[in-house]
Image (cartoon, helix red, strand yellow):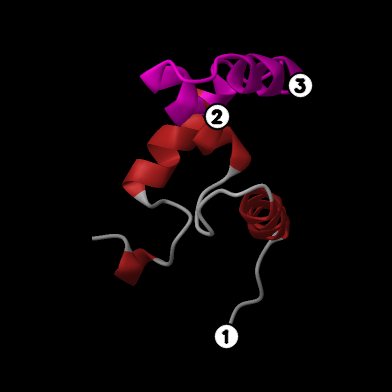
């Protein structure tokens, strides 16, 4: 059994905080922020997070797309 790498641990922490703030347990704050930006309900969270991760172009959108692709899951659970 492989232990999670650093990125997986950070994703788990992110998902934990998202859940504490009323979000879905298996979604990151960045993905949630992009969903709200996309539906027009809240624009500022995505703006803020994208500026925190300034070295990553469209960080929240990439996180959202990663959630859609289920790329954070083990390969056998992605389909």
Alpha carbons under labels 2 and 3: distance apart: 13 Å
Q: Mark 2 vs mark 3: which is more N-terminal? A: 2
Query: Disc 3 on helix, strand or loop?
Result: helix
Residue at 67% from the left image edge and 47% from the top image edge: 21
Query: Disc 2 on helix, strand or loop?
Result: helix
Task: Please tell me how crowded label 1 is: few (under 14), some (14-19), or many (20+) other residues with Cα within 10 Å.
Answer: few
Residue 79, image x and y in percent?
A: 23, 60
Residue 23, image x and y in percent?
A: 55, 48
Q: Pointer 2: what residue?
A: 33
Residue at 69% from the left image edge and 55% from the top image edge: 20
Residue at 47% from the left image edge and 19% from the top image edge: 37
Depth check, mark 2 against mark 3: the one in front is 2
Query: Which image quadrant for residue 39?
Result: top left
Alpha carbons under labels 1 and 2: distance apart: 33 Å
Callout 1–callout 2 Cβ contact below 8 Å: no
Depth check, mark 1 against mark 2: the one in front is 2
Task: Please tell me how crowded label 2 is: few (under 14), some (14-19), or many (20+) other residues with Cα within 10 Å.
Answer: many
Q: Pointer 1: what residue?
A: 1
Callout 1–callout 3 Cβ contact below 8 Å: no
Q: Tell me where the magenta segment starts and ends, as one range.
A: 34-60
Q: Pointer 3: what residue?
A: 52
Q: In the picture shown, does residue 4 fall above or below 39?
A: below
The secondary structure that most of the magenta stretch takes on is helix
Query: Which image quadrant for residue 44?
Result: top right
Task: Please tell me how crowded label 3 is: few (under 14), some (14-19), or many (20+) other residues with Cα within 10 Å.
Answer: few
Q: State the residue lying farthest toward the bottom.
A: 1
Q: Mark 1 vs mark 2: which is more N-terminal? A: 1
């Amino acid at each position: 059994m492989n232990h999670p790498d650093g990125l997986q641990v950070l994703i788990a922490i992110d998902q934990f905080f998202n859940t504490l703030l009323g979000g879905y347990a298996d979604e990151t704050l960045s993905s949630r922020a992009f969903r709200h930006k996309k539906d027009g309900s809240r624009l500022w969270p995505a703006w803020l997070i994208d500026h925190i991760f300034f070295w990553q172009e469209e960080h929240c959108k990439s996180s959202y797309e990663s959630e859609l692709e289920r790329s954070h899951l083990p390969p056998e659970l992605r389909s």
